[in-house]
Image (cartoon, grey):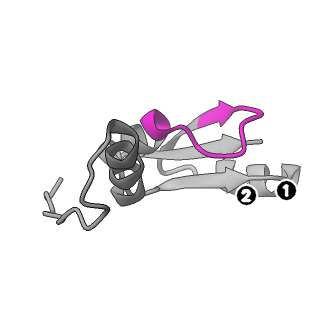
Amino acid sequence: MASEQFRYSGDSEVTVEKLKKWLLSKLPNYVTSLKTVAEAKEFASEKAIHKVFLFTDKKKTPPIFQALATEWNNKLRFAVVN
C-alpha cells in the first residue's frame, strides 16, 4: 500500500479526540454498505473473489473494518450489512 502524507490543519490545540477524528477522516473506505437482500445477492454473486461480511446495528462502519478492507483491497471484498 502506498503511503500518503497529510498535514494536520485542525486547531492549534491538538487533543487526542481531535487527532483521532482527523486520522479517521483520512482512512479510505473500501467497504460496501448493503441495505437490502437484493444488494447482498448482487454483492455475493461475484465469484472471482472472496467476501467478508460484517453484520451490525451500528450506523457507521467500524474503523478497524475499514482498515482491514484497505489492507486487503483487491484481494477480498468487504461489506457491512445494517
Q: Is residue 7 above or below residue 40?
A: below
> In the depicted view, which residue is nearer to us: 50 or 61?
61
Type of amino acid under label 1: Ala
Q: Residue at x 27, y 52 (%)?
A: 13
Is 61 within the magenta? yes
Residue 45 appears in the rendering:
no
Is 4 within the magenta? no
Graded by Cα atoms within 10 Å as few (under 14), some (14 to 19) or many (20 or more), the crowding at tag 2 reads: few
Q: Is residue 19 left or right of residue 82?
A: left
Q: How many marks?
A: 2
On residue 42, which mark appears? 2
Residue 32 appears in the rendering:
yes
SS label for mark 1: helix
Type of amino acid under label 2: Glu
- Asked whether the beta carbons under mark 1 and mark 2 sit within 8 Å of each other, the answer is yes
Q: Which residue is mark 1?
A: 38
Q: Is residue 59 above or below residue 56?
A: below
Q: Is residue 42 left or right of residue 69?
A: right
Q: Which residues are magenta?
A: 53-65
SS label for mark 2: helix
Q: Quadrant of the C terminus?
A: top right
Separation (CA) of disc 1 from disc 2: 6 Å
Graded by Cα atoms within 10 Å as few (under 14), some (14 to 19) or many (20 or more), the crowding at tag 1 reads: few
Q: Which corner quadrant of the image does residue 11 belong to? A: bottom left
Q: Is residue 61 left or right of residue 69?
A: right
Residue, far right: 37
The picture places residue 17, in percent across and down from the top left corner, at 40, 40
The picture places residue 80, in percent across and down from the top left corner, at 65, 43
